[in-house]
Amino acid sequence: MIVKVENVSKAYYKIPVIREMSLDIERGERIVILGPSGCGKTTFLRMIAGFIPPDKGRLVIDGQTVADNGKSIIAPESRQVGMVFQDLALWPHMTSYKNIEFGLKAKRIPKTERKGRIDTILEKIQMVQFKNAYPGELSGGQQQRIALARALVTHPKILLMDEPLSSLDADLRQVLLREILRLQEELAITMIYVTHDREEAFSLATRIVVMKEGKIQKTGTVSQIKEWL
Amino acid sequence: MAKRLTLYITIFLFVGIGFVPVIVMFLKSFFVDDGFSLNTYGTLFQSNREWKLLFNTLSLAGATTFITVLLGVPLGTLFAKTDLPLRRFFTVIFIIPLLIPSYILAIAWFYCLGRAGIVACVLGEATGILTSNLLFSFAGTLFVMVSALLPIVIILTMTYLRMVNPDMEEAALLHCSWPVALRRITLPLISPGIALGALITFILTLAEFGVPSFLRFDVYSVESFTRLSAFYDFDSTTAAAVPLGVITIVVLIIERLFLRRKTFVFRTMGSENEMVIVPLGESKSYFLVVVSILVFIFVIAPLCVLLCKSLSPSAYSEAFIRSTGSIMRSLLYASVGATCLVIFGFFLGYILDRKILRFSYAADSIAVFLFALPGAVIGIGLSGLWNTQGTNFIYTSMVIIIFGYIAQYTALGERVMAATFPYVSRSMEEAAQIAGAGWYRRIFKVLVPLVKRGMIATWLICFIFCLRDVGITMMVYPPGHDTLPVRTFTLMANSPDNVISALCVIMIMITLLPLCGLGLVKKYIT
Ligand SMILES: Nc1ncnc2c1ncn2[C@@H]1O[C@H](COP(=O)(O)OP(=O)(O)OP(=O)(O)O)[C@@H](O)[C@H]1O
Ligand SMILES: [Mg+2]
């Protein structure tokens, strides 16, 4: 088991946003969290990433307790998770290459190895020719790929994605979904993907978690959820 | 952890440097002869003079604010939103008075309207006495304060106009003409900016020391200074400072209650689209004439008077002989001050924008309170606290001046930086954090590069405010550490007019030169 969420709750200004959520995630799974706007999906993801501590409950990543009873024990920078943000959050003052390299530098990985890893991942996402471009010079889909590469290049234990495709048009979304799927299978990485789009969930998930008002309403495989809905 | 530690240390240092002296001064005033007593305040508002001071202070601040808004909003609108010819030139010229110590304008008008001034020479002695009486009165002080602070409202109006989403105006233009759209849509949208301008004008007038002191108009900030320099009596000085502190706090509470939320609502409507320009059409020349007259009265006339008055080689050589050291010190202290202020502003602005610490508003309130508090009051607090055997190295060096700058102007740095941070979305930082970067790497590799322009702007603004400071420096400067504005002010009593004029012109030049230089560099790069 790579992620264990135990009775986690979170409230903002006394209004509960996450209520007593529990969830176990196995290594290599593609979990899609599906739910309407405002049900707490982003909050849940940010708790796993470590940006906000849960008010109650326990979070375990890869056997290590990262947050317990209102306290964050391990900071986001040490949790070894990768994340693709809804607004991508590419740093506009760095080229694609520098964006991807940032995490490797922070982890003090030697230059030659950095270069090798970046070249590999750029090839995987077919963006080699854009490595010296700034984010502002890239199209939406290209930026998306760079954000994905940046999240993956540090070999995180889990990849978190918060509606990463919501700003793209339908065709491009299909293309990128397939690509994400391919990459995930290649790297055998555990993925938690947040969306409110059913089709996206069905085409991506090995398991779907349906959320409503801060609670898990139902968990199951794609066919189970399709039937239930 | 490193993050919290840095932020707490910043707050701790700021409060220690800026707030503690004022608090200690206030508390000390309750202990007369080793016992608790209210004696210090026994005389407060007992005499007619005190009531007059209060009345003068409030009416000057109120009238200055009213007229500044009345003139500044239309001017700002003309400069930012219309096709008025020469509007960039006008903007630049109108801003000059804000960049220099305000008392320089008072000097210029004195040379023009005083008993032996230009007017008296041309129109005769009787007229001279009349104009002189006018200048050394409420009306004269008001006029000089308006010309000094008008730029604040103009700048804020222009800034907020640029942030208005043009769609909103265009939506209105489908139904009405420009004057109506401006009045019904645009002005309400920028009302938080206008209110902010009014607030700053009011507070800066309260705190102004140079102009009322020169024009012998009795207000509280002058009173504090006089009591300290004439009697060296800390307690009665504090007593004179308390009403100002109280007024300041009241004004700030009003701001908290009414302005904060509106500002927030407004910010979310910002847009990067081009602004819609209003065509002035046939009335263009009419507006041009009015604006030209205003710019002449408020800025060009006084500056020309100084320039003409100073025009002789001997005046300038004399001025340089008397002030070279002060010029160098001014530049040095202002640079060091601005650099410290950028650092404080960076972290405090970050705390304010991201609301990460529970008492982020408390730190902001203290900063704004100190900004609003007259420099003379802060100066008294600083001298009182550091004038001891053990801390002489602070009291007798430039450090105490820098402390004064930090105390008074941190709010500037903080607010400008806080206005910059929203442009860096939280996720930019979080992305760096999750990539494994610690706090310092996030600061230097992500935050600083992304807010670099805001930091440069902050530095320049703080530099100018430190450079033009009179209130604090006058109070705390150790012997041999005076700055140019202070030197000019003290030389005024016993130097020829042309030397004083030359000193004022030099002061204006050293303020404007760095700005012009920067403008040229920017033009060259882009
Ligand atoms: N920093 C915050 N302060 C106060 N309330 C918040 C904060 N962040 C989230 N909330 C509230 O928590 C609830 C859940 O928000 P969250 O962003 O997790 O929803 P979401 O499921 O991701 O929605 P969406 O699909 O629109 O992104 C919302 O009602 C929101 O108003
Ligand atoms: Mg969300």
Image (cartoon, rainbow, N blue to C red):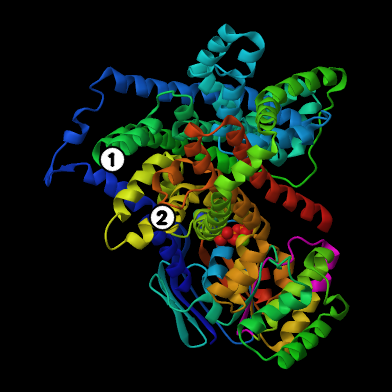
Res. A124 image quadrant: bottom right
- Identify the amino acid type marked 2: Ile
Label 1 Cα crowd, 10 Å radius (few <14 / some 14-19 / many 20+): few
Residue A206 coordinates in the image, percent (x, y): 67, 80
Q: Secondary structure at mark 1?
A: loop
Q: Is residue A165 magenta?
A: yes
Give the residue at mark 2.
B400
Residue at x-position 42% and y-position 52%: B363
Residue B391 coordinates in the image, percent (x, y): 31, 61
Question: In this view of the protein, can residue A55 be seen by the observer?
Answer: yes
Q: In the rendered structure, the residue with mark 1 lies on which chain?
A: B
| Residue interval drawn in magenta | A156-176
Q: Is residue B72 magenta?
A: no
A87 sits left or right of B444 in the view: right
Q: CA distance from mark 1 to mark 2?
A: 18 Å
Give the residue at mark 1.
B232
Residue at x-position 30% and y-position 23%: B50
Residue B209 versus residue B55: which sits nearer the camera?
A: B209
Question: In this view of the protein, can residue A229 be seen by the observer?
Answer: no
| B326 w.r.t. A52: above or below | above
Q: Are marks 1 and 2 on the same chain?
A: yes
Which quadrant is the N terminus of chain B positioned in?
A: bottom left
